[in-house]
Image (tube, grey):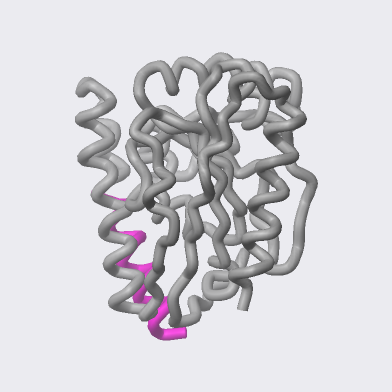
């Protein structure tokens, strides 16, 4: 409890700095802005290890392509939304629009060009994923999407949405599937963080050209779910 409390105090104080900083940096090109704001994720990674003794190991770094890609990942924890910024190249995220309203955190997030969705309007959300996703990819950014749409407990599974697969099929950019077991140590909606080592497995690139979005989604889901089952404790 004490370690987790110290962790949250540290990252909250950091947000008090990075939130207004994100606003001040808005006139800068996105590449430069991202480089500065990304330091918050590096701080969180370091602080998490120091306070909660929680770190990670990555398998499959050789599978990261040199060109932009669409990252489709299992989502068990808030952990991956932060540490993926440390592991993968410059990226933007599909997020809930209401997150942008959170003081400090929302300011920092808004400065990083997320694709913010109103989940009540599915048709408009899909259009934004396709239009803004193509734009972000063309600008040299990765697009991070959690196809299940929300965090799930270890051992659970939700229906895989097709937004990421449709973006891949229409844009021609490849998909990089990722499996994690972060929920074993940083459970969804839990204050307590358990010490240990989170496993991150990066799968082989799934080429989108010549495939339908249904084929891409099925291949992604199959690889992620089979790999998650292997790495669960």
In the image, residue 96 sits, relative to residue 158, either above or below, namely above
Q: Nearer the viewer, residue 117 or 100?
A: 117
Q: Which residues are magenta?
A: 1-17
Residue sitting at x 49%, y 67%? 199
Question: Is 60 on the left-hand or right-hand side of 215?
Answer: left
Residue 134 location in percent, x, y?
51, 17
SS majority, magenta: helix
Residue sitting at x 52%, y 30%? 174
Asked if residue 15 lies in the magenta stretch, the reply is: yes
Question: Is 27 on the left-hand or right-hand side of 63?
Answer: left
Residue 47 location in percent, x, y?
29, 69
In the image, residue 133 sits, relative to residue 216, either above or below, namely above
Residue 196 location in percent, x, y?
44, 80
Instruction: Report which quarter residue 89 is drawn in.
Output: top left
Q: Nearer the viewer, residue 106 or 219?
A: 219
Q: Is residue 200 visible?
A: yes
In the image, residue 132 sits, relative to residue 109, either above or below, namely above
Q: Residue furthest bottom?
A: 2
In the image, residue 53 sits, relative to residue 61, either above or below, namely below
Asked if residue 6 lies in the magenta stretch, the reply is: yes
């Amino acid at each position: 409890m004490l370690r987790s409390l110290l962790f949250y105090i540290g990252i909250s104080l950091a947000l008090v700095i990075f939130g207004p900083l994100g606003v001040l940096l808005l006139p800068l090109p996105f590449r430069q802005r991202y480089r500065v704001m990304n330091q918050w994720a590096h701080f969180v990674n370091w602080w998490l290890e120091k306070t909660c003794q929680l770190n990670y190991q990555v398998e499959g770094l050789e599978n990261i392509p040199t060109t932009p890609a669409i990252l489709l990942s299992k989502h068990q924890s808030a952990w991956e939304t932060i540490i993926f910024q440390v592991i993968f190249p410059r990226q933007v995220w599909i997020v809930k629009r209401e997150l942008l309203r959170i003081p400090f955190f929302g300011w920092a997030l808004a400065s990083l060009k997320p694709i913010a969705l109103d989940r009540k309007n599915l048709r408009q959300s899909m259009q934004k994923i396709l239009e803004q996703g193509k734009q972000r990819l063309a600008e040299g950014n990765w697009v991070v999407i959690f196809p299940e749409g929300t965090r799930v407990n270890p051992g659970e599974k939700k229906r895989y949405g097709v937004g990421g697969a449709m973006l891949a099929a229409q844009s021609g950019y490849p998909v990089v599937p990722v499996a994690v077991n972060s929920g074993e140590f940083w459970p969804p909606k839990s204050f307590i963080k358990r010490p240990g080592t989170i496993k991150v497995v990066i799968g082989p690139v799934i080429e989108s050209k010549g495939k339908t979005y249904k084929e891409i989604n099925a291949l992604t889901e199959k690889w992620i779910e089979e790999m998650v089952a292997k790495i669960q404790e």
